[in-house]
Image (cartoon, helix red, strand yellow):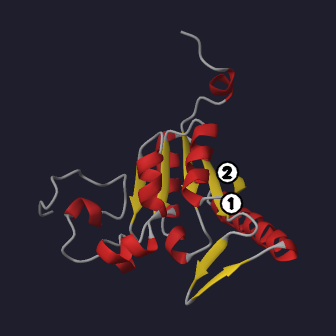
């Protein structure tokens, strides 16, 4: 059995961390960096900007953007990921950054494929029912399409007290797996 040349260059497991410049997305950074440390892996930060002309939903609005505005969004995405990579570097890890354009879920999956990732990490609102049906779920689409396991992080501010104990664990290194619903 031969190993692809790409794998021989860097046999460390790759963790892909999807970020969208939101506080919610950044809640996944600690889990991703902790996993990279534990696995002696490498970290790839990915940001996705919709294609020029795509409709973009924001708080109370739906807009489209083109031209200079689009170039600005791409530049802002690159700068944002570079700032996150610098924060991570200050803690002793390095992170590669990738900015893609298009459908967020499809591009996160594409980066995972391109980098032969072992894991995708991203935050989720954890919406259900009508909210999820109406707003969609990038995380859900990544889980459905992803070539590797996806670790979804729900920020503490969105968690409910009645969640299972394992979901409430704040550190992976000290977490003891328990059956769903088991008390600590």
Could you tell me residue 139's position as x and y percent?
45, 60
User: Could you tell me which secondary element the residue under label 2 belongs to?
Assistant: loop
Q: Residue at x 59, y 79 (%)?
A: 57
Q: Quadrant of the C terminus?
A: bottom left
Counting from the top left corner in percent of width and height, residue 157 is at 38, 80
Query: In the rendered structure, are the residues bearing label 1 and label 2 in contact, judged by CB atoms less than 8 Å apart?
Result: yes
Q: Look at 76% across and 72% down and name the residue there.
A: 73
User: Can residue 114 be seen from the camera position used here?
Assistant: yes
Picture disc at residue 10: none
- Residue 87 percent location from the top left of the image: 66, 65
Q: Which residue is mark 1?
A: 85
Residue 62 relative to residue 150: left or right: right
Q: Estimate the spatial distance between the alpha carbons at disc 1 and disc 2, rounded to whole Å.
A: 7 Å
In the figure, is residue 132 to the left or right of 175?
right
Q: Which one is earlier in the sequence, the residue at label 1 or at label 2?
A: 1
Label 2 crowd (10 A; few <14 / some 14-19 / many >=20): some
| Residue 92, visible in the rendered structure | no
Compared with 120, 12 (above or below) is: above
Residue 110: name its quadrant. top right
Q: How many marks overall?
A: 2
- The one of 27 and 33 positioned closer to us in this rendering: 27
Residue drawn at (76%, 67%) of the image: 52
**From what the image shows, is residue 106 above or below residue 61?**
above
Q: Is residue 66 above or below residue 4?
A: below
Residue 34: % across, % down: 48, 54
Q: Nearer the viewer, residue 144 or 83?
A: 144
Kindly identify which numbered label has been placed on residue 94. 2
Which type of secondary structure does the marked residue at label 1 adopt?
Answer: helix
């Amino acid at each position: 059995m031969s190993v692809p040349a790409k794998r021989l260059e860097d046999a460390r497991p790759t963790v892909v961390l999807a970020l969208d410049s939101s506080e919610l997305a950044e809640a996944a950074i600690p889990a991703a960096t902790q996993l990279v440390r534990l696995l002696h892996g490498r970290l790839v930060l990915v940001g996705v900007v919709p294609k020029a002309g795509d409709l973009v939903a924001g708080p109370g609005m739906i807009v489209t953007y083109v031209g200079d505005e689009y170039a600005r969004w791409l530049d802002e995405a690159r700068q944002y990921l570079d700032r996150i990579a610098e924060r991570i570097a200050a803690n002793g890890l390095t992170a590669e950054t990738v900015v893609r354009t298009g459908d967020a879920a499809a591009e996160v999956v594409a980066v995972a494929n391109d980098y032969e990732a072992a894991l995708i990490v991203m935050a989720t609102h954890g919406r259900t029912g009508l909210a999820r049906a109406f707003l969609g779920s990038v995380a859900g689409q990544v889980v459905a399409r992803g070539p590797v396991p996806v670790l979804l992080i729900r920020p503490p501010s969105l968690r409910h007290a009645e969640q299972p104990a394992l979901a409430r664990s704040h550190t992976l290194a000290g977490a003891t797996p328990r059956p769903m619903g088991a008390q600590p």
